[in-house]
Image (cartoon, rainbow, N blue to C red):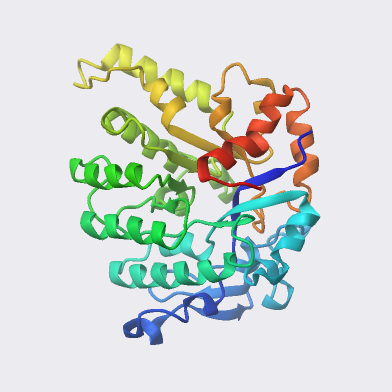
Amino acid sequence: MYDRIISADSHVAETEAWYEDIDPKFRDRRPRNVDDPRVGAAVVVESLPQVVPLGMICTAGRPPEKIGTPMPWAEVNPAGYDSATRLATQDQDGVVGEVIFPSVGMLLVLHPDADYKKACFDAYNRHLVKYCSINPQRLIGVPQVAIRTIDEGIQELEQAKAMGFKAVMVPGEPIYKDYDHPDYDAFYEAAVALELPLDFHILTTKSDVFPVGRGPHICGHQRFVRGNQDIISMLVFSGVFERHPKLRIVSVESDASWIPHYGMRMDAAYNHHRYWEQVNLSKMPSAYLYENVYFTIQDDHPVGKMTELLPMDRIMFASDFPHSDGIWPHSKEVADRLTKTMSDTHARMITHDNVAKLYGITV
């Protein structure tokens, strides 16, 4: 097993300190820490229907029987909000670097006030620079962009690049129209020119966070990937990748063993209904799925037996630290099990080389 694992999807646990540098206009309304008796450690964000339950979310390393019981701030792993101990948690997990996404910010995406959301994102991004500064090659932060307008979205890309970031996290729920609208072409052109992948994380769409479905609540965990699948289909069939062949997006925390079947379904729909639906592409839809989209996985063990069917140069291993779905501190063990049926080349690709190449990481 290759021993230089990089997690392509990890997180921080934002405290209220992450939003102290907010636009003064919003200072009295910034997110606040609380210990909530129902969930433990939490962040209150005005106008959201519930607190952000970090005491339920940021519980990596806890035994399953403890997940779902309130965990106060005093028990939250400090590596989630203070980078002084973050490198030690990486060493404990057997990883040499992490691509880092928000936790509170995933729900802030759904905030109804676009201006407030933008102010929170900007404050978060500034704090993220400080958090990662202890070792920017091992802590690869991904800032959030709001895209209230296309012009402002392009400015956000330029600012992210100037701040040293290597990608941006795009909301699953857009403020301005939807991502297949032709107005976004200028935004995509800028992303390509600036060499910034666009990262779409699960649980940033309304359908993921507020799923409507049948059966008990746990059934919702099976639906989390669907928001990203919808985004991918939209970008493929609307011709976004056709017009921007060098555009790179990342489907974060979506796993990958579903890709061959999904590609087959897209191709079948295209073959049977392209004239009826008035869709014309120069390649089969699955080609864009395999060429323009990257995917992060955790313990998606079927991947190890599907290497001939998957775009192995687009799949990236992740720990999801410190979330409850995460595999910390067992990433190396999980990676060993996942890759044991793979060639050494494929094992290196998904645990290190793909993510290193995509984000320009040198560790």
Query: Does residue 194 appear in this view?
Result: yes
Q: Position of residue 218 (x, y in %)?
A: 60, 48
Q: Residue at x 49, y 48 (%)?
A: 202
Q: Nearer the viewer, residue 200 or 137?
A: 137
Q: Quadrant of residue 181?
A: top left
Q: Residue furthest top?
A: 272
Q: Residue at x 35, y 85 (%)?
A: 24
Q: Position of residue 238 (x, y in %)?
A: 26, 31
Q: Nearer the viewer, residue 140 or 222?
A: 140
Q: Quadrant of residue 150?
A: bottom left
Q: Quadrant of residue 197?
A: top left
Tell me: residue 198, above or below residue 156: above
Q: Is residue 181 left or right of residue 129?
A: left
Query: Does residue 224 appear in this view?
Result: no
Q: Residue at x 40, y 56 (%)?
A: 161
Q: Residue at x 43, y 53 (%)?
A: 169
Q: Residue furthest bottom?
A: 28
Q: Is residue 185 left or right of residue 219?
A: left
Q: Is residue 4 left or right of residue 245?
A: right
Q: Position of residue 300 (x, y in %)?
A: 66, 34
Tell me: residue 183, above or below residue 230: below
Q: Position of residue 130 (x, y in %)?
A: 55, 71
Tell me: residue 162, above or below residue 172: below
Q: Is residue 24 left or right of residue 106?
A: left
Labels in figure, total: 0
Q: Quadrant of the N terminus?
A: top right
